[in-house]
Image: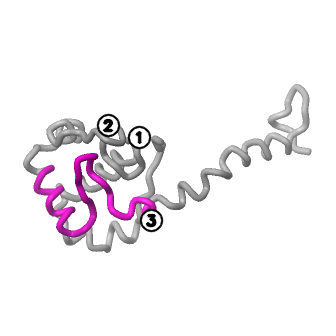
Amino acid sequence: MRRKWVKIWVDESLTGTVRFDLTPAERSIWYDLIILAGACRVPGQISSNETTPFPHDYIANLLQVPLDLLQTTLKKLADTGRVSENENGIHITNWLKYQSEYDRQKKYRGRKETQDKDKYLKGKYQDHVKR
């Protein structure tokens, strides 16, 4: 499931451990990895599909960063428990905790649009005249 957005915590990003554990370049890669994990088919997993990981050189090229910087950042992220990596891809630790609000609200999105349409009168200007 691909997302249109990912949740980034403001306070934790500005004052949390990511701020002093990682250099500015590494933080950039960390946030790019979160975005990439949201764009991939498996939530929280950076891979082509459930069983096919992206090669590191592909990810580095996609993120427009040097391969050695990506690899040292991945090692640091793994050492600090933010990511893990196996034969299926790179996994963002606690992905569901980070993105839980998106999943929690998903069931209400379609229903809200339907309810809003019922608030308006039918006719030529139905989208502009409330009941």
Rendered image: mark on residue 97: 3
Residue drawn at (47%, 42%), measured in percent from left and top? 1
User: Residue 41's mark?
Assistant: 1
Above or below for 117 versus 98? above
| Secondary structure at numbered mark 2 | loop
| Residue density around tag 2, few if under 14, some if 14–19, many if 20 or more, within 10 Å | some
* Residue 112 image position (x, y, % from top left): 73, 48
Q: How crowded is mark 1: few (under 14 residues within 10 Å), some or many (20 or more)?
A: some
Q: Residues within 10 Å of mark 3 (few under 14, many from 20)?
A: few
User: Which percent across, then down, holds residue 8?
Assistant: 41, 59
> Which of the 4 image quarters holds residue 79?
bottom left
Q: Which of marks 2 and 1 is nearer the N terminus?
A: 1
| Mark before the other along the chain sequence, 3 or 1 | 1
Residue with the most extreme top position = 124
The answer to which of marks 3 and 2 sits earlier in the sequence is: 2
Residue 66 position in % (x across, y down): 11, 43
Q: Assign the C terminus to one quadrant of the image.
A: top right
**Contact, CB < 8 Å: mark 2 with mark 1?**
yes
Q: In which quarter of the image is residue 98?
A: bottom left
Q: Residue 123 carries which label?
A: none
Residue 22 placement: quadrant: bottom left
User: Cα distance, mark 2 to mark 1?
Assistant: 7 Å
Say which element carries label 1: loop
Q: Which amino acid does label 3 sit on?
A: Lys
Residue 99, how many percent across, how many down?
A: 46, 58
Q: In this view, does 123 lie to the left or right of 92?
A: right
Tell me the tag on residue 48. 2
Which range is magenta? Answer: 70-98
Image: 61 above or below 14: above
- What separation in Å lies between label 3 and label 2 (alpha carbons)? 23 Å
Q: How many marks?
A: 3
Indicate left or right for 126 with 80 as reference. Answer: right
